[in-house]
Each structure stands twice: as C-alpha cells, then as structure tokens.
Image: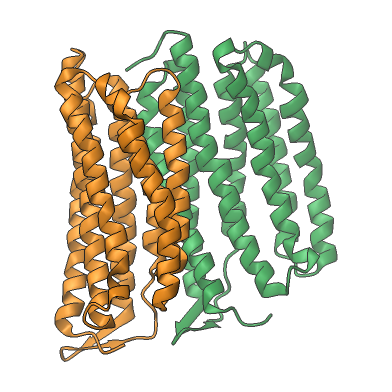
Chain colours: A orange, B green
Amino acid sequence: MEQLSFAQYSLVYNSFSFVIAAMGAATIFLFLNRSQVAPPYKTAVTISGIVTIIALYHYFRIFQSWEGAYAVVNGAVTATGRPFNDAYRYVDWLLTVPLLVTELILVMRLPGSEGTKKATKLAVLAVIMILLGYPGEIATEASTRWLWWGLSMIPFVIIQYELFVGLRASIEAQPAAARGLVSAGRYITVGTWFFYPLVFVLPMIGLGGTTAAHVSVQVGYSIADVLAKAAFGIFIYSIALKKSQFEGAVAH
Amino acid sequence: MEQLSFAQYSLVYNSFSFVIAAMGAATIFLFLNRSQVAPPYKTAVTISGIVTIIALYHYFRIFQSWEGAYAVVNGAVTATGRPFNDAYRYVDWLLTVPLLVTELILVMRLPGSEGTKKATKLAVLAVIMILLGYPGEIATEASTRWLWWGLSMIPFVIIQYELFVGLRASIEAQPAAARGLVSAGRYITVGTWFFYPLVFVLPMIGLGGTTAAHVSVQVGYSIADVLAKAAFGIFIYSIALKKSQFEGAVAH
C-alpha cells in the first residue's frame, strides 16, 4: 500500500473526532430528554442513548488505535507497526445494530408479545449479518471480500423486507399524528443502513488505489454511524414525543 | 509457553473491549430503567446494575493488564515481563457472585425473613466457592488445578441444589404471569454458571498447547461474564417489570 498523505491521515483523524462529539451530544440529549416522553416510550429512548454511548466508547478506542498506528514526523506519515484495529467497528455493530432495530420496534408499541417476537427475530438476523461481514472486512483479496459481502447481504435483505413489508400493518395501527413519522423511520433505517454495504465495496471497486479506499472506508463508516445512530436516535425520540403528546400522558 | 500470535492477542483484546461495552450498556440500562419497576423491585434492579458496573471496572483493569503484558512490534507479540493479572477476575467474582444470587432472591420477593436467610446462605457459599477456586487458577500444574477445582465444586453444587430444589416451593408462590420467568431464572443461573468450571478445566485437558488454552480461558470467561452478569441483569429487570405490572403498582 502506498504511503498515507498527511491530508488523508488528518481527514480520518478529524472524522473520528467529529463522531466522538456527535455521539456524546446525542447521548446527553437522549438521556436528559428521556424525562419528556410518557412511560411506555422511555425504554425506546433509553436504548437510543445506549446505542450512541456504546458508539462513543468505540470511537474513543478507534481514535486511539488510529493515532497509535501512524507516526507523524515533519508532516510525513509512517506506519508504526501497530496495526489499526478494524474489529472495534464490528464489536460495536454486534451490540448496537440489534439495539437499533429494538428501538424502532419499541417506539411502535406493538400489541401483546408481537413486539418482543419481531425485535428478537430482527436482532438475531442483525447479529448473523455482522458476523458474516467481518471475515470479508479483514480480507485483502477482492474475491474474499465479495463472498462475505454477498453472504452478509442475505440477512440484510431479509431485515429490510421485514421492516418494509412485515411492519406495514403495524404502521396503519399507529395514531394518525405519528403514522407519517413511524413510516419515515423505516425509510430512514433502509437509507442509512445502505451506506454500510456501499462503503464495504469501496476497496473492491479500486477507488483510486488502496490508500484512498482505506481512507474512504473510515470516513464513510463514520458518516454512516452518525446518521444511523445519533440522527436516528433523535428521530426515535421525536416519534416517542409525538406519541406521548397524542396519548395525553406527557410526564414533565 | 510458545509465543502468542497477533491473531490470538487481538482476539483476547477485542473480547475484553466487547465486555467493557456490554457491561457499560447494561449498567446504564439498569440504572435508567430502574424507574420503570415498582418500589419492592427497585433494589433487585439496583443490585443488577451494581454487578455490571463492578465488572465494567474490573474489565477496564483486565484490558490494561493485557495491554501492558504484551508489546506488539510489526505484528509480532512479545511478553513485556509484566505478567497479566489473573486476580482481577477473582476480586470481581468475590463481590459480584454473592450479589448475583441476592438479585435473584430479591426479585422473587419471598415472604418474611426467608429471602434474607436464603440470600445470606447462598452468598456465603458463593464466597467460599470463589476463594477455593483461586489457588487452582494461579497454579500451573494440572493436579493442583484439579484439587482446587474439586474443592470449589462442593459449594458450587450446593448452591445449584439450593436454587433448584430449595426454591421450588417459592416458584409456586409467584404470580402466574411471572412464574415461568422466575423458574427460567434458575435455569439461566445454572446454565451460565456452568461455563466457569468448564472454562477452568480447559488448560488441564491440554487444549492444543498452553497458549491456545490461555486464550480460550480469557475468551471463555469473557463470554460467561457477559451472560451471567449483563444478560442475567436484564433478565432480572424483565421479571421485576412483569411483577410490577401484575401487581398494578408501577411507579413512573
């Protein structure tokens, strides 16, 4: 791999710092404003904040790992021999992605045990999806990356189908004031989640050499994580607030 | 002992980081959602969160100890001469295992002083069990490890018997809605606790050389701790929530 330029090194460095600030801000907002929603929605908001604080923890580690992997001397960037740890992202996703589907299902407040069943099913599929992605992520050969990408896309597509088609009836049952927001929640999930498989393929489509691809993957995942976790968490909070107001049981 | 490979080093490293994230997430969930259960169950949920925060603290130390025990230079792992500190686990268990049996007994809400008696008895047995395990854990000879393993299994079996047979009558007295969950709690305790004596014997059954055994023990205990503390704590919370809802006294 050709040498990382100082501009490339800084771009990744500053992206990670941006994610730390965004995740920290979202966590504080969600934990403090949890008091603004009615009791049935508090768990959805709690879990949204837990997702962003888990990401905050991992981005601290990712940032440190990036700093430790390169030495900057007189504007030249050289590898220190301590490899950048890609596993943090997958450990993060293993915990946060099942929680992300859970917060969406929880805020919908499905009747009886339907919510628990759907959340469990989607969470298990999410774990399988992430476990299948990891062997590809750490592989350097494009063919190996494609294989695991393809396998990982199977649960990915099933989850998206479940959210879109399987939850259609539940959308109809939402109060009119929140129906549009809850339905948008499915689109936002699909939209933000699609970033990940797209970022994953960047090194396989030869994006201007491997160093550029390496940088694009780090910056791409950083943007995807802020949208899918911090922005999505605030969005879940707005649904919870809307439904609380509608049900006339807002606790202040 | 043969040299640790970088893959083995990273597997343990990432497992420890995973446990830190999982314990932190469980702690925040339990402390925030403590507001969702009725007053008689708040202490059980508080203690569940204390167990995970004690584990969080110890895994920070364990992680640092692991980082300090090895140096990674150009992908090669060498021992620094500062030995990895096994004692953190036993100090952790000495505090958390008596609390784990207490949270299960508390959420059952036994009549009169029965709960205090049972919790005290089980907590004392748990402390004896852990104290008897430690001399074996730090021993390198298989025969010494077996001796202390065997001694430690005596209180282990008594605790399991007490949970299974001794608490049978109390299960019958639980509200119908929570009976299945409380009964499952005993199975989950037995299931997750069995991991520990099994992981302990890995180095004695010659699992592909001592380095592989060393790695398996660290990863095995990490998984066992997440199940027996974080997952178990969330489970205790669900029993508390179910019983609060049944008793119609949910405090918000």
Residue shown at the point (25%, 83%) measured from the top left: A209
Residue nearest the viewer, comparing B194 with B99? B194
- What is the count of numbered marks? 0
Whether residue A103 can be seen here: no
How far from the left and from the top, in percent, is residue B155?
A: 77, 40
Judge by depth and name the residue closer to the eye, B206 or A216: A216
Q: Is residue B208 above or below residue A50?
A: below
Residue A203 can be seen, yes or no:
yes
Q: Write down the quadrant of residue A66 in the picture.
A: bottom left
Query: Which quadrant of the figure has residue A147?
Result: bottom left
- Across and down, in percent, residue A48 comes to 29, 39
The quarter of the image holding the N terminus of chain A is: bottom left
The residue at the point 28 percent across, 47 percent down is A52
Q: Is the C terminus of chain A in the top left, top right, bottom left or bottom right quadrant?
A: top left
Would residue A81 appear left or right of A23 to someone viewing this image?
Answer: right
Expressed as whole percent of the image width and height from the top left, the position of residue A168 reads 30, 28
A231 left or right of B140? Answer: left
Q: In the image, is residue B160 above or below residue B62?
A: above
Relative to B184, does residue B87 appear above or below in the rendering? below
> Residue at 33% across / 34% down in the picture?
A165
Instruction: From the viewer's side, name the closer residue of A37 and B69.
Output: A37
Task: Determine which quarter of the picture holds residue B33.
Answer: top left
Residue A136 x %, y %: 43, 68
Q: Residue at x 70, y 64 (%)?
A: B138
Looking at this view, name the residue that lies furthest to the top.
B248
Left or right for A127, reference A56:
right
